[in-house]
Image (tube, rainbow, N blue to C red):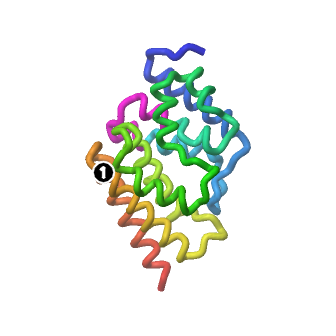
């Protein structure tokens, strides 16, 4: 399907694509909400904090290649190279060990394009909210604390493009730290 120039239609088209790609998937948190809620939340964060349309659309699609059968070529065909490129830039290589992927997110964050920086920062904001409010049942307190610290290290390299997102990350980070500190004792 040829992309449209109407922003609302483009966002809805990407939402439908993501919903179909993530059909049947649930988030790992205790609420077990539909996975598509995460990508919608990321796109909403981007839209309400001044990100450009291609970044918002990529926010809806950012986990399709990583977590579904969708390929980069599928995204190029459906949304064009610019959006597919943003998704690729924000996607981890699942063939690498987890610790390597996490280290690469920290080291590569400052080298990303402005669009990918905004996308990754919104993704981290959404994930921090989930870790604080609906963590996976098998994540002990120490693992949640480690995740929040790691997210802060990744975010340090993503700053400076969108001050509104930077501020939202800071407040979300502080809230997650406070909640985890209160749970500690």
How many labels sit on residues? 1
Could you tell me residue 28's position as x and y percent?
64, 58
Q: Does dot 1 land on a helix, a strand or a loop?
A: loop
Residue furthest to the bottom: 185
Identify the residue at image location x=64%, y=50%. Answer: 95
| Viewer-closest of 35 and 156 | 156
Magenta stretch prevailing secondary structure: helix
Q: Quadrant of residue 114?
A: top left
Estimate how packed mark 1 is, as few (under 14), some (14 to 19) or many (20 or more) residues with alpha carbons within 10 Å. some
Q: Position of residue 139 (x, y in %)?
A: 61, 70
What residue is shown at x 46% (from left), y 54% (from top)? 105
- 1 w.r.t. 108: above or below: above
In percent of the image, x 64 and y 33: which residue is there? 71
Q: Residue placed at 53% from the left, 44% from the top?
A: 91
In this rendering, is residue 146 above or below 90?
below
The N terminus, quarter of image:
top right
Please provide percent x and percent y for residue 36.
61, 42
- Residue 68 is covered by the magenta coloring: no
Residue annotated with mark 1:
159
Front in this rendered view, residue 161 or 100:
100
Task: Specify the segment rendered in magenta.
Answer: 45-59
Q: Nearer the viewer, residue 22 or 69?
A: 69
Q: Residue 20 at x, y = what percent?
A: 68, 33
């Amino acid at each position: 399907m040829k992309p449209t120039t109407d922003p609302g239609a483009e966002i809805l088209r990407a939402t439908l694509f993501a919903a179909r790609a993530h059909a049947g998937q649930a988030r790992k948190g205790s609420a077990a909400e539909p996975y598509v809620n995460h990508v919608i939340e990321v796109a909403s964060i981007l839209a309400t904090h001044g990100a450009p349309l291609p970044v918002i659309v990529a926010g809806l699609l950012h986990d399709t290649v990583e977590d579904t059968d969708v390929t980069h070529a599928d995204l190029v065909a459906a949304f064009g190279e610019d959006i597919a490129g943003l998704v690729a830039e924000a996607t981890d290589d699942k063939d690498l060990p987890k610790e390597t992927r996490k280290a690469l997110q920290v080291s590569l964050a400052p080298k990303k394009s402005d669009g990918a920086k905004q996308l990754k920062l919104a993704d981290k904001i959404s994930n921090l909210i989930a870790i604080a409010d609906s963590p996976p049942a098998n994540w002990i307190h120490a693992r949640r604390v480690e995740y929040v610290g790691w997210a802060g290290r990744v975010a340090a390299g993503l700053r400076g493009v969108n001050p509104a997102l930077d501020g939202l990350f800071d407040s979300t980070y502080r809230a997650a730290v406070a909640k985890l500190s209160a749970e500690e004792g």
